[in-house]
Amino acid sequence: MINIEVAVGLAHEQNDDVVVVPVLKGALLTASGEGLKNIAPDVIDDVLQTSTIWGNTGTSYPLYRLQGTQARSTVLLAAGDKTKLTLSALRDLSAKLAADLNQQGVEKAACYLADLAVKDASVADKVQAIVEGAYLGLYEFKHHQSVKKEHTKTLQTLHIMLLSNDACDEANAALVKAKAIAEGTIFARNLGNEPGNICTPEWLGEQALSLSHPSLNVTVMDKKAIEEAGFTALLAVNQGSAKEPRFIVLNYQGGQAGDAPVALVGKGLTFDAGGISIKPSAAMDEMKFDMCGSAAVLGIFKAITDMNLPINVLGVIPSTENLLGSAAYKPGDIITSYQGTTIEVLNTDAEGRVILCDALAYAVEQKPCEIIDFATLTGACVIALGGQATGLLGTGEAVKEGLKKSGEHTHDRVWELPVFEEYQKQIDSKIADIKNTGGREAGTITAACFLSRFVEDVPWAHLDIAGTAWNMKATDISPVAGATGAGVRLLVDYLSRKVETSNE
């Protein structure tokens, strides 16, 4: 992984291979650019006045061996409209810059993106966004390719430059946090991008066990242990698969002994063919991403343990495949959950809520202060919100408000849908306690209504990441089409804010 450091100094004094200085729309310079202009006024003035690229965010103008500078190349980078600069835009700009420098074979670079003014953002906020963007912009998933194209040089060191020492401590703390978040996101992306023949429930359990921290305990139950524990809804979904299920429990005691943990529950469907209610064949390969809820939980645990975040967090992941074996559960079956609630199965492709109900009921027994679950649960959420926002539902008002605040700050955004009591009627069954589907209308909401039957009075938020967990079109921040790691940045920010609040 690239080495990123915070450093202090003027642009013309840096001896990196490339020094990057931002230029805003309208050919406006920041403080670093003004300093550079003092060294080479004629050249900089000429470029600013003659080039028309400054409104094209991410476009660069290289100046080789600029007189008065130490770097091989000084790059003027179009940073866009100053009135539209956000932390998200800064993160995207950094991602594109890192990818471009890497592609160009630059080994060592210094950038002055922290010089840009972002409304209501501190230097630490900006450094965090820049570092996250750089790490994620360099993300690749190529280890299954037998023939690899190697660059003769790749970006090895990136200096995030400040013009003074005033905010160095805060910037370095932000760097540590950003690296942890980026590595957690990359961990989640890697899990999600693995094909179903590799990422099986057993393999997913092994990845959970690979997380190591003195305050983290990980338990992975095999099928026999799951049967003994009574996770019968998970076992029902697993009936059609030759692969054993796993029930994964992570217990991180980073906070005070006795403090109730925040419980994170993640759907771990390592491949979902729909079962007897089989899915259409088109894009079925993407159903390897149906475990991205579990990937988010594991990525969050990686990040918070790397940060040594002082909070107690419980993780619960039910994992299985949903296939069409001769013993597969069928439409019309009635199964009994771990909690004792009976479920009429009308659609075997509504399996995520079925395995989650056992995990939620188990989480409730551990007496958490709140529960947040992550699931690629409904296609209806994709229709409603697309890939721009995660669906948010639940009963915990404070939890939901906190997630909204973190979503706006991190740009890992959420949008709330209602869970009115009237919707609950759609999942009432005439022959069992509940049905596993409420029909086409309000599908995302009735799925949440199903889950709500298993959380009792614990404050609870449900994150439907069906639209945000993967993207088959590459973007600046996610240059590799596939899993996005949605939820990691959101929850690390949310948990960090809880820690800050508790310390006030």
Image: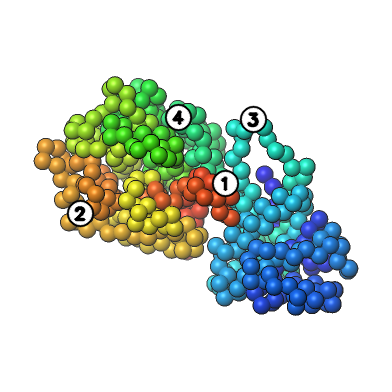
Which of the two discs, 4 and 1, labels the residue nearer the N terminus? 4
Report the amino acid beneath label 2.
Tyr
From the image, tell me which residue sits under label 1.
480
Residues at marks 3 and 4 touching, judged by CB atoms closer than 8 Å: no
In-front residue for pair 347/342: 347
Report the amino acid beneath label 4.
Thr
Q: Is label 4 in a helix, a strand or a loop?
A: loop
The residues bearing labels 2 and 1 have C-alpha atoms spaced at a distance of 39 Å
Q: Is residue 109 visible?
A: yes
Q: Nearer the viewer, mark 2 or mark 1?
A: 1
Which of the two discs, 3 and 1, labels the residue nearer the N terminus? 3
Report the amino acid beneath label 3.
Ser
Find residue 200 and name its label.
Answer: 4
From the image, tell me which residue sits under label 2.
423
User: Which class describes the residues within 10 Å of circle 3: few (<14), some (14-19), or many (20+)?
Assistant: few
Q: Is label 2 in a helix, a strand or a loop?
A: helix
User: Which class describes the residues within 10 Å of circle 2: few (<14), some (14-19), or many (20+)?
Assistant: many
Q: Position of residue 454 (x, y in %)?
A: 26, 44
The residues bearing labels 3 and 4 have C-alpha atoms spaced at a distance of 22 Å
Q: Nearer the viewer, mark 3 or mark 4?
A: 3
Residues at marks 3 and 1 touching, judged by CB atoms closer than 8 Å: no
Residues at marks 2 and 4 touching, judged by CB atoms closer than 8 Å: no
